[in-house]
Structures are given as C-alpha cells and as structure tokens.
Image (cartoon, rainbow, N blue to C red):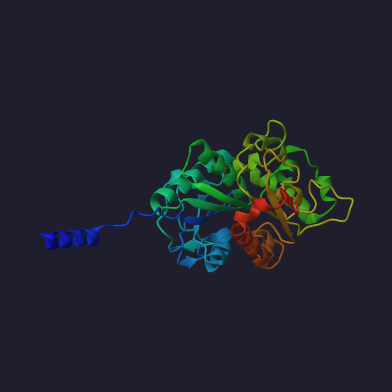
Amino acid sequence: MRSLALLAAVTLAGCSHPAPTARQPSRSVVIISGLASTSPYTSPEAACAVGLAAGTDHTPLREHLLAAGHSVFTAPAVAGPGQVHATTGYGAFASCPAPLPAAMTIDSTGSIDLAGEHLARFIDWLHTEKKIDEVDLGGHSMGGLYARAAIRTLLADGSPITVRSLTTIGTPWQGSYLANYVEGTVPLGACLGDQFCESQMKGYVRDIAAVHISGSARELGKSYLTGPKGWNTAQAGVLDRIPVTLIGGNRYTHPDPADAAVWPNDGVVELRSALARDVDDTVLPHRRCDTVDDTHSDYVSMITDLPRTTALTWDPRVLDAVTAAIDNAPKAFDGPNRQGC
C-alpha cells in the first residue's frame, strides 16, 4: 500500500502545473497623418503591395521603425468620411490590407475632435484584436492634433490602453500662418515680399473654400486653438503623464526683423507653432524639441523643386529623431520639463 501511495504522489506531482504568469504588455507604434490625407491601414506584417507601402506620409517612418525592431501600425485616414481604398496619382498605393470600418477611419477633412474619436476607436481595436496594451503615437501635421484628441477620448472612456509617448512632426500646435492669414490675424505683408510665402497664403484661401477640406482646415486658425477658451486650453491635463517630442521645420527663413507668426516656417506651419512655444505648461508639461531645415511634406518639397528627403516625413534625421523619442520615452521624465524648446 505504501508503494502505491508513493506512486500516486509522484504521479500527481508530475501532473501539476505552475501558476500562470502575467502576460507581458504588448507595445506598438501608431503613425497618424494629417489634413486632407489618405493613408491605408497597415500592420507590422502587412502593407500595400503596389506603390507606396503605407502612403506618402507613413511609408518612410514605418520602414525605419520596423527596421529598428518596433511593431508599427498606421492609422487609416481618408479625405472625407468612409473607408480607405486604393489611390492613383501622387502617393499612389494599391493591394493593401483589408480596409477598416469608417467608424475607426480618420476623416482627415472633419473636425479635430471627430478625427480623435475615430482614432481612439482604432487604438481600442488594436487592444481588442491585436492585444496591444501600450502605444507610442507619432503624428504628422494635424495628425499630432488628432492624436491629442484621441488621448483625451481614451482617458475619458477609461480605455485600458496606455499611451507611452507622443511625437509630433510639423504639427500646428498654435495653428498655421496660412489659416491665420485667412482669419485676418496675419497680413499678406508678413511675407515680406517672398513669392512662395504669398502663393501659399493665397492658395490656402482657395483650398479652404473647397468643400473637401471645410472641417479641419477651419480649425487651424489661432482663434480656434489658442487663448483662454481655445482648443488647447480644453486639453489641460491630458498630457500630464505623457512625454512629448515636437519636431519642427525651418526650411524657409527671412532676415530679421521678421514676424515670428510666419518666419521661419516649413511652408505650411511656422516654427513657433510646431514647437508649441506659446502653449502653457498646464497643457504641455513635458516637452522636448528638435528643429531641422526641412519642408512640411514631400509635396511641399516637390512644388519647390527640392529632393524628397528635405521633407519632415522623409528626412532620415527626422526618422532617427522619432525613433530616439520612442526609445528614450521611459527616461523622458528624468530631465528638465523643457529641452530645446
């Protein structure tokens, strides 16, 4: 009997299982494009097989981050409501992963807050379907504002997702001098006779009148974003626990004295706005800034006969800076609250 009892004990011991260990948090980078852009959804494993793998705004950064060992998703965006489909012409892409529902696709012509709600749904979907627990957000142009609106929505909804860091690239934190010209707060004379500056201002007047960018484009002005009752003020507290890196371009300059509301700029956003120099610490308490001599986008580089790599979205220096911001996020609070800003 003793031998049978011993055998049973050994058998039971062999069948026992160790206590399950907690699943390690899964982290990914989410890249967000800006105003009037159309960008496909891509995952670390799947992208568009024809044309630009993730669209003109996302492709270089996506490839750079993947090469650095990061998991990367690109948020779907379309110039108007609906799903993303293949595009032709400038920035063409096709044979992409299946488009996601319109409810989690950014309408890059709608309001900032609506875009943020759709982006928040996409991020929650990553948690539910892809088991992502932490995200590093990288937004180009108004994508940085969409990201901030999404963070606010995630916090308000009690989302289980943790936003680990935010990097904005050419984002109009305080608006764009082009929209301010439309509002009448920046005169054409602030261009100081620069023909490209004047053509951009006049072109924005034409573009903003078009129905397809009648939403976000009208929220790019200083009157909407700044001031005691502005959009920025309403975001106070949202970024308290999130380190933020701001990257701005100063490709276009003018000898002093020049109005800082325009000069220097990247062709769309003045450097003062891209670096959030007038945004209060209650809204942006932890910030690090980088400045490069780039244009706003490869489109701006194209129309001014510059190489694609002179654009914030394609410059290897910017891609390195974004990667460094993500890699250094855990130590971001060790230094001063403002660095290079």
Q: Position of residue 184 (x, y in %)?
A: 76, 38
Q: Position of residue 49 (x, y in %)?
A: 45, 67
Q: Is residue 250 in view?
A: yes
Which one is nearer the viewer's eye here, 145 or 4? 4
Q: Quadrant of the N terminus?
A: bottom left
Which one is nearer the viewer's eye here, 254 or 284? 284
Q: Residue at x 46, y 54 (%)?
A: 25
Which one is nearer the viewer's eye here, 299 or 103? 103
Q: Residue at x 57, y 61 (%)?
A: 56
Q: Is residue 111 in view?
A: no
Q: Residue at x 73, y 38 (%)?
A: 183
Q: Position of residue 11 (x, y in %)?
A: 19, 61
Whether 244 is drawn above or below 60: the answer is above
Instruction: Give the image quarter of residue 210.
Output: top right
Q: Is residue 137 left or right of residue 316?
A: left
Q: Position of residue 31 (x, y in %)?
A: 55, 55
Whether 215 is drawn above or below 68: the answer is above
Q: Residue furthest front?
A: 2
Q: Residue furthest left?
A: 1
Q: Residue furthest top?
A: 229
Instruction: Give the image quarter of residue 321.
Output: bottom right
Q: Is residue 330 left or right of residue 187?
A: left
Whether 8 is drawn above or below 145: the answer is below
